[in-house]
Amino acid sequence: MKNKKKILVLMGGRSRERSVSIASGKACCDAIKKIGYKVFKYDPIKNIKNNIKKK
């Protein structure tokens, strides 16, 4: 692929299913990378905490 498409995988969150969401999100990321796409992971909880620490 010349111009790799970019894909954002949303995973995590605040529910009791957080660990399942993270595990399945990572599996999706691995599979998407294997077929040649550029993958970004986004966990709203983790990203919010990082943004707060920066301020």
Image: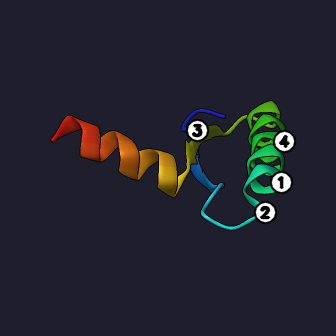
* Front label number (3 vs 1): 1
Q: Position of residue 12 (x, y in %)?
A: 65, 55
Give the side of residue 48 with respect to residue 19, left or right.
left
Determine the residue positioned at 61% across, 61% down: 13
> Between marks 1 and 2, how big is the CA–CA gap?
5 Å
Q: Splitting the image into 4 quarters, where does residue 54 fall?
A: top left
Residue identified by numbered label 3:
4
Q: Position of residue 53 (x, y in %)?
A: 26, 38
* Front label number (1 vs 4): 1
Q: Nearer the viewer, residue 48 or 24?
A: 48
Q: Who comes first in sequence, dot 3 or dot 1?
A: 3
Q: Position of residue 32 (x, y in %)?
A: 77, 42
> Between marks 2 and 4, how big is the CA–CA gap?
16 Å
Give the side of residue 8 with respect to residue 52, left or right.
right
Placement of the C terminus among the 4 image quadrants: top left
> Between marks 1 and 4, how big is the CA–CA gap?
11 Å
User: What label does residue 20 carry, if any?
Assistant: 1
Residue identified by numbered label 4:
27
- Helix, strand or loop at mark 3: loop
The amino acid beneath tag 3 is Lys
> Between marks 3 and 2, how big is the CA–CA gap?
31 Å
Vertical side of 2 occupied by 15: above or below: below
> Between marks 3 and 1, how big is the CA–CA gap?
28 Å
Residue identified by numbered label 2:
17
Check if mark 1's residue and mark 2's residue have beta carbons within 8 Å. Answer: yes
The amino acid beneath tag 4 is Ala
Q: Who comes first in sequence, dot 2 or dot 4?
A: 2
